Image (tube, rainbow, N blue to C red):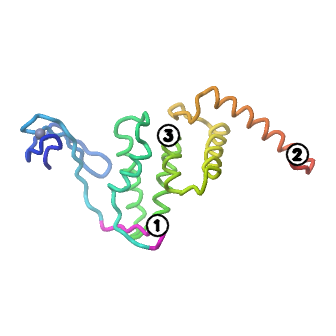
């Protein structure tokens, strides 16, 4: 592996440890002294992804990584989060033990993880992956997200979608709306 900074062909390993299904090696370039990281992993039996238009292509971890990275761009996530996410998904895919997986399954795996990780990244990914037809569909998704956040346990590590004060105001409004709906349902009237 050539040095990503100067292109020199040789480096020494300064640290090595096992991660998930591979080995992570911290290297130092023997020419310029820069440090970089490589991963060594076993190439499992081929896995094919069935696309929406029925075409098949070999599973490509880099492609998955690029998609996640784009969604997480400039989000305040700990270093290595994106790689770990891709690792987890890749491992889960191979553990399915299937030779073909619909692209939708992979998309859902990413969505599920991003949802509990970072809401902005989630919405970004969803907007590409689900190809929201218009702004209304996108807004619906955001509303669902905010709704579930308000009603469910919110982990402290979760980055808020909205600034705190707006979120609280919104949850209050939502609570009222929900209350009204319940009453209306009982009386059978709809608003
Ligand atoms: Zn170098």
Q: Residues within 10 Å of mark 3 (few under 14, many from 20)?
A: many
How would you classify the magenta stretch by its main secondary structure? loop
Q: Is residue 82 above or below residue 169?
A: below
Farthest top residue in view? 165
The question of residue 51 being in magenta is answered with yes
Number of callouts: 3
Q: Within 8 Å: ligand 1 and the Cβ of disc 2?
A: no
Q: Within 8 Å: ligand 1 and the Cβ of disc 1?
A: no
Q: Which mark is residue 118?
A: 3
Viewer-proximal residue, 163 or 28? 163
User: Residue 118 at what x, y percent from top left?
Assistant: 50, 40
Tell me if 47 is positioned left or right of 121 in this view.
left
Q: Which mark is residue 102?
A: 1
SS category of the residue bearing label 2: helix
User: Residue 165 at what x, y percent from top left?
Assistant: 63, 26
Distance from Cα at disc 3 to Cα at disc 1: 25 Å
Viewer-proximal residue, 106 or 190? 190
Tell me if 178 is positioned left or right of 39 in this view.
right
């Amino acid at each position: 592996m050539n040095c990503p900074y100067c292109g020199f062909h040789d480096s020494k390993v300064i640290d090595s440890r096992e991660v998930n299904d591979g080995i992570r090696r911290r290297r130092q370039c023997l020419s310029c002294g820069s440090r970089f990281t490589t991963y060594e992993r076993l190439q499992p039996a081929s896995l094919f992804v069935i696309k929406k238009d029925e075409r098949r292509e070999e599973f490509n971890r880099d492609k998955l990584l690029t998609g996640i990275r784009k969604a997480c761009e400039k989000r305040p996530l700990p270093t290595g989060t994106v790689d770990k996410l891709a690792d987890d998904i890749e491992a889960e895919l191979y553990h399915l033990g299937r030779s073909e997986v619909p692209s939708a399954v992979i998309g859902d795996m990413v969505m599920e993880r991003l949802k509990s990780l970072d809401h902005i990244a989630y919405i970004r990914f969803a907007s590409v992956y689900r190809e929201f037809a218009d702004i209304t569909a996108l807004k619906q998704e955001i509303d669902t997200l905010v709704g579930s956040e308000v009603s469910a346990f919110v982990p402290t590590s979760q980055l808020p979608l909205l600034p705190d004060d707006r979120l609280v105001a919104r949850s209050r409004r939502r609570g009222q709306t929900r209350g009204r709906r319940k009453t209306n349902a009982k009386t059978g009237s709809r608003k």
